[in-house]
Image (cartoon, rainbow, N blue to C red):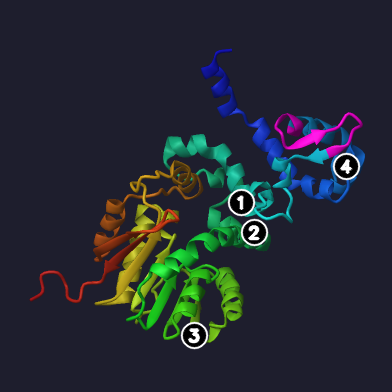
Amino acid sequence: MTEPAQQLARLGDLLTPYAVRTAATLRLADHVAAGHERVDELAAAAGADPRALRALLRQLAVAGVVALDPDGRIALTPVGELLRSDVPGSWRAHLALDGAPGLMQRAWAALPDAVRTGRAGFPDVAGGGFWEVVGGDPELTASFAAHLGDWAAQWVPVVAGLLPLEDARLVVDVGGGSGVLLGALLDRHAHLRGVLVDLPAATEQAARHLAGCGVADRVDLRPGSFFDPLPGGGDVYLLAQVLHDWPDPEANALLARVAEAAGPGARVVVVERLADAGAGHPAMDLLMLNLFGSRERTHEEYSALARAAGLHPVSAVPTDVGLHLLTFAVPTAPEGAP
């Protein structure tokens, strides 16, 4: 086999990724670390068939995830150690096929249809739209919130430190999820008050998080759809990694709702990756397509959406976590007015 053919075979292999994800799903590394070092013991701990587990372990050994001793003992390699739940930098939750992250990964099976049609492939695998399926299952909702929380730990401190809010009184976080960003902003700026708009399951999580931050008395939680009329009177309206979840018609409608609520002189801050910012983010672009029928957008594409909603582009500030802060202004007077 030629080297290009070998490379293509490696790139197209699904067995090894699924073997690793099966190990994560069954918590094999946790069980081995707990002392279940023989196949029968490990199978009993993991609730697996011994013969099938033995075949899986052989594949994991080829992949360098476990080591199999001649006497039949199983040991974790340094790679396999990262599948333990209790180690710093654990990858178990990211790779397991249960929970919302696993459901998102299983939905890649529908990518061919998504690319053919330009529509989300997720419903073909999950039997419904992403928000419908995840929001309708408490366990999926919780696992998705935890998944977003891992990422939020990286980007929220950076974004919170870059947002100029000294002259703002009220911040409205549209699609604010569990309140991590709003909580960080209120913690940094003691003069601020906040409003968080999201679906009921998210606002319930936000209530707990904001109480833990000690800022709950400065936040008004508004459960509901952000496609409905939004709370007015805000000085700054935030849309942090919300618009990329929606195709253009819905993104346009959401920005129009924000512009309508914001009123003259307010600012709208969109926090998103930019498809033209150099890094490219092709994987995230395909993920948005497959989950939502959406995409990552360029700066000009976001600006065009904003202009269509009556907003004026003001600035684009890059961060060192791959996101940009795009600020738009609500005109103080209608265009063409004296």
Residue at 74% in and 56% down: 86
Q: Which residues are magenta?
A: 60-74
The crowding category of the residue bearing disc 1, from other C-alpha atoms within 10 Å (few below 14, some 14 to 19, many at least 20), is many
Point out which mark residue 37 bears: 4
Nearer to me, 322 or 135: 322
Point out which mark residue 143 bears: 2
Give the image quarter of residue 265: bottom left
* Residue 150 visible in the picture: yes
Q: Which of the two discs, 2 and 1, labels the residue nearer the N terminus?
A: 1
Q: What residue sits right under mark 1 in the picture? A: 101
Q: Secondary structure at mark 1?
A: helix
The quadrant of the picture occupied by the N terminus is top right
Q: Which of the two discs, 1 and 4, labels the residue nearer the N terminus?
A: 4
Q: Which of the two discs, 1 and 3, labels the residue nearer the N terminus?
A: 1
Nearer to me, 94 or 293: 94
Q: Secondary structure at mark 3?
A: helix
Q: Amino acid at mark 4?
A: Glu
Q: Amino acid at mark 2?
A: Ser
Q: Amino acid at mark 1?
A: Pro
Q: Which of the two discs, 4 and 2, labels the residue nearer the N terminus?
A: 4
Q: What residue sits right under mark 3 in the picture? A: 218
Residue at 56% in and 59% down: 148
Do the CB atoms of the residues marked 2 and 1 lie less than 8 Å apart?
Answer: yes
Do the CB atoms of the residues marked 4 and 3 lie less than 8 Å apart?
Answer: no
